Image (cartoon, rainbow, N blue to C red):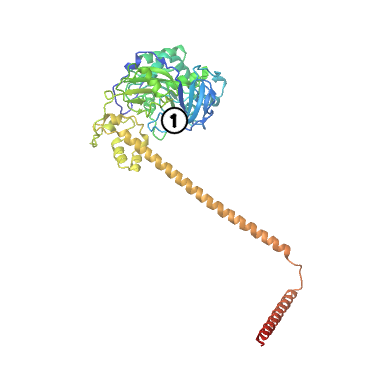
Amino acid sequence: MQLFKFKGGVKPDPQKTPSLQTPIGLAPVPALLVVPLHQSIGGVPNPLVKAGDRVLKGQRIGEADKWISAAVHAPTSGTVIAVEERVAAHPSGLPTLSVVIAADGDDEWMERRPVDYAALTSEQVREYLRDAGVVGLGGAVFPSHAKLSAAKSVPMEDLVINGGECEPFMTCDDLLMRERAEDIVHGAGIFRDLLGPQRVLIGIEDNKPQAVAAMREAVEACGENFSVIAVPTRYPAGGAKQLIRVLTGKEVPAAKRSPEMGVQCFNVATAYTAWRAIAHGEPVLSRIVTLTGNVEEPRNWEVLLGTQLKDFVALGKPKADTNAYLMGGPMMGFEMPSLDAPIVKASNCIIAGSQALFPPLPPEMPCIRCGACAEVCPHELQPFEMYWFSRARNFGKTQEYNIFDCIECGCCSYVCPSRIPLVQYFRFAKSEIWSREREKSMSEAAKARYELRNEREAREAAEKAERLAKAAAAKAAEKKPEAAPSDAPAADADAAKKALIAAAIERARVQRESVAATDSDGAKP
């Protein structure tokens, strides 16, 4: 099969061997689990439990909010002790609404109900996957059911199953493919049946020969005609757009999504969890996580979601000089804000760091405009221009240079001779633009509400005046006397006026005489 190339990319030291020496281990159930409700792109699931409730393993504790969202489930049986804000596995360290469960040690399952998806409509299968919490486990955590809605205007040509795993240190997908290949193939079959593509392509970097062999054997054993393809190892070949380019030759423009080009992409772990949900009635309660770096026993573990970092890293026996923990790879990952932060669906790798493993970067030097960052950018951007405008806070110009096309892969920072943390500048610029857009939207919404209120008050005042006018007219009509000769009203009015004048004159005369008499009596000796 003909393969294509994508522009740019780098070849960092893979550092994958240490965590590949032992099979996937099953992490023990911790005493306390902190399960964030928001573990995917989209809306925050609504909590379905409260403090004091007993939950079973697999029970839904968070209901999907709207279509772009996914449910959350209890990883084990136990008692809910709180539904409250807890620190999140996020670089900001901000808290997020979480369900805190005290495990009872029984690990008691709810009733599991596998389904025959062939007997369901496509919509029912997608809803089932949504309620099972299936999301993209390659790191983006986009709800999978939404991606399984094919673009109606473009026929689906290619379904790509992503086994690239290009980040250094990370090996969770590699071992998953080696040990559970048939389940991945079955999951890919579900996606194939829902999308109806012409081809199914499984792309794996060629530095994973055992995974390639295991997937080819599984495809043959399952009787599928999927193509398992070894692609050249080059970071970020595991990115969706880059892998699509390598396998199909299609370049997805920034303004479009891959389904609009007739192709869709899913991670191998996503396909695996979809099959477990459909065939075994198991929602997403755990995931394979690579624990590596400055630890004595690097390994891949299947760990329950909600396990706190302090409980998980203890399995690898961190060395005494460990000073930080990264979630994700060194290229795109971030430092965990606290040992209390939990493992979530996006946690594919935890790297224990040290001064020796990740020495402090030398001081940032001025940009020399060498262009090395532009040469390695897989999206053919101009990072040095975006850097200058981000630093100058000229966010309009950064958008002219398509800053939102940047996938923050870190290739530019990796090759920069001036050691400029370019990705950090780009993240800052994006956050500022988003913040200003939110403020603008809020301002426009407030203005619209103010204008609507003024219009409503004016309308209500006009309606009230109209009602009063109608009531006054009706009252006047009721008091109107019967018709009389035309000169009678005028004559009666004149006569009444004259009578009033005469009565007033008479009262004044009587008053004068009374005053005069009083004065006369008072003047007597």
The quadrant holding residue 225 is top left
* Crowding at mark 1 (Cα within 10 Å: few <14, some 14-19, many 20+): many
Q: Is residue 162 left or right of residue 282?
A: left
Name the foreground residue: 466 vs 382: 466
Q: Residue furthest bottom?
A: 525
x and y percentages locating residue 391 in the rendered image: 30, 40
Q: Which residue lies furthest to the front in this view?
A: 525
Taking 448 as reference, is 71 above or below it? Answer: above
The quadrant holding residue 24 is top left
Q: Which quarter of the image is occupied by the C terminus?
A: bottom right
The three-letter amino acid code for the residue at tag 1 is: Arg
**Number of numbered tags placed on the structure image:** 1
The quadrant holding residue 397 is top left
Q: What element carries label 1?
A: strand
Name the foreground residue: 135 vs 159: 135
Taking 46 as reference, is 275 above or below it? Answer: above
Taking 359 as reference, is 397 above or below it? Answer: below
x and y percentages locating residue 514 in the rendered image: 69, 82
Q: Residue at x 73, y 66 (%)?
A: 480
Name the foreground residue: 76 vs 16: 76
Q: State the residue position of label 1.
A: 86
Q: Which quarter of the image is occupied by the N terminus?
A: top left
For residue 71, say whether it is visible: no
For residue 449, say whether it is visible: yes
